Image: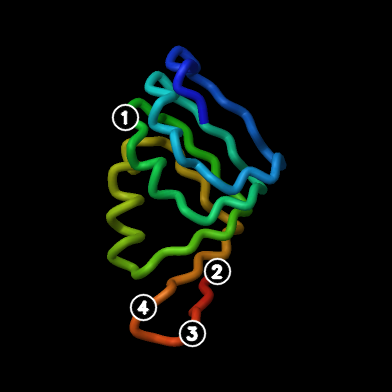
Amino acid sequence: MGSCLTKVQVLWMPRCATSDLDGIASLSSLRELYLAYNDIVDISPCSLLEHIQILDLEGSVIRIESYISLVRIISPLCRASPILIKFNLICIVSVKEPYIREYK
């Protein structure tokens, strides 16, 4: 995202067709992140946000390799209040299985 934006505390980017969160950790002061209704698939970069208080990922399609991966990613974010992931299609993608299971 942007390495020179270290002072940004609130970022609103709903419905921007954002699909990649690589580099989000460089926003080291970020406290509120609003990314509702984007094309975000991988939320793992969000686990690096140390000061996050509000995380809104409503309406994204999240792909996770397993339930354990989901817990590992979401657990550090539990300090955020609230985490909005409602209305997400969460796909559990298994390397061993040739199909994708979809959960709502």
Q: Position of residue 20 (x, y in %)?
A: 54, 45
Whether residue 26 sits left or right of residue 15 in the image: it is left
Image height of 5 relative to 93, above or below: above
Whole-Å distance between the Cαs marked 1 and 3? Answer: 35 Å
- Of pointers 1 and 3, the one earlier in the residue sequence: 1
Label pair 3/4, CB-CB below 8 angstroms: no
Q: Tell me the element at label 4.
A: loop
In this figure, which residue is indicated by the disc labeled 1? Answer: 50
Residue 95: numbered disc: 4
In this figure, which residue is indicated by the disc labeled 3? Answer: 99
Q: Position of residue 86 (x, y in %)?
A: 56, 54
Whether residue 29 sits left or right of residue 20 in the image: it is left
Q: Tell me the element at label 1.
A: loop
Whether residue 93 sits left or right of residue 58 in the image: it is left
Q: Tell me the element at label 3.
A: loop
Whole-Å distance between the Cαs marked 3 and 2? Answer: 17 Å
Image height of 77 relative to 50, above or below: below
In this view, the residue farthest toward the top is 7
Q: Position of residue 88 (x, y in %)?
A: 57, 59
In this figure, which residue is indicated by the disc labeled 2? Answer: 104
Which amino acid lies under the numbered mark 4 shown in the image of this protein? Val
For image coordinates 28% across by 55% down, the residue present is 72
